[in-house]
Amino acid sequence: MTLRLGVNIDHVATIRNARGASYPEPVRAAELALAAGADGITAHLREDRRHISDGDIDQLSELCRKRGRPLNLEMAVTDEMVAIALRHRPHAACLVPERREEVTTEGGLDVVRGHNAVKAATSALRAAGSRVSLFIDADAEQIRASAEAGAQVVELHTGAYCDAARAGEAERAATILERLRAGAAQAHDLGLEVHAGHGIDYATVTPIAAIPQLAELNIGHFLIGEAIFVGLPEAMRRMRQLMNAARAAAEQAA
Ligand code: PXP
């Protein structure tokens, strides 16, 4: 199975919004990413609209529809966001936890405690034709609850692994990686498609991409940052190369 690369373009909007200007435009980054072979575009419409705006979602929806490529809308489990998603009917809706004070999405969705709300949102979104993904930590109970809530996909949060690996905390990183491996296997056995994302860069992508059950990685901040220096197509090309090499090596070792 080749590993898909979803490109998250949120932080193009972060740069635009830093000046309250109309550029750089996330839709232009999405167009470039698709032309450079992205398997899909991911955008997170946050409640506080700190980066992606409602207008961006209109433009990204239109672009992805025109190009026949998937849009993955990341969203909190709120009535407002569900209503927006039902209007746009994106290919995929990824339900994420959201706290106003956080800098980025810290930790996964608590599907166990929020089961009823997650299940209701999942069934509404599925009825509108979206594939529903739940962004969770690689935790056995959360994975089981995700399947019970009716999601087709789980996206495993790789942020803690990437932080530990980058900090040189090898033992902690190895423990978290093992949890990600076990979680991917469990989710796959339950019939869920398995994605992963958050915090991935060139230095951390290899062991993640080698997890055989993963079908898709969603990567944003690092790719957009790297694009400043080498351009988005080159940053994506290098990331894809590392992903493919990791997958090929893992398949050969199996
Ligand atoms: N996947 C999900 C569900 C996310 O919330 C994010 C961050 O918006 C990402 C992937 C991408 O993370 P990063 O920007 O750190 O690559």
Image: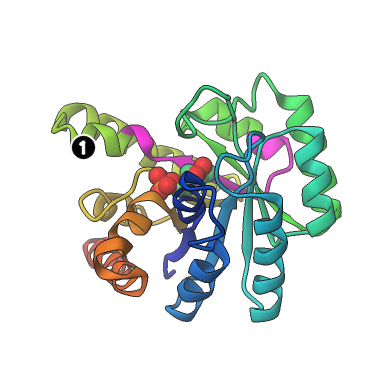
- Of 67 and 164, nearer the camera is 67
Query: Is residue 155 visible in the rendered structure shown here?
Result: no
- Name the residue rendered at 57%, 66% in the picture: 27
Image x and y of residue 172, in percent? 22, 27
Task: Report the amino acid beneath label 1.
Answer: Ala
Give the mark count: 1
Identify the residue position indicated by label 1 in the image: 165
Which region of the structure is painted magenta? 146-160
Q: How is the image coloured?
A: rainbow
Label 1 residue SS: helix
Magenta stretch encompasses residue 13 = no
Quarter holding residue 226: bottom left
- Name the residue rendered at 63%, 40% in the picture: 49
Image x and y of residue 7, in percent? 47, 61
Quadrant in which the C terminus is drawn: bottom left
Q: Is residue 218 left or right of residue 242?
A: right
- Name the residue rendered at 25%, 48% in the picture: 204
Quadrant in which the N terminus is drawn: bottom left
Magenta stretch encompasses residue 149 = yes
Q: Taking 136 as reference, is 254 above or below it?
A: below
Query: Is residue 7 visible in the rendered structure shown here?
Result: yes
Q: Is residue 142 left or right of residue 57?
A: left
Q: Taking 189 as reference, is 129 above or below it?
A: below
Q: Is residue 169 left or right of residue 84?
A: left
Q: Taking 141 as reference, is 84 above or below it?
A: below
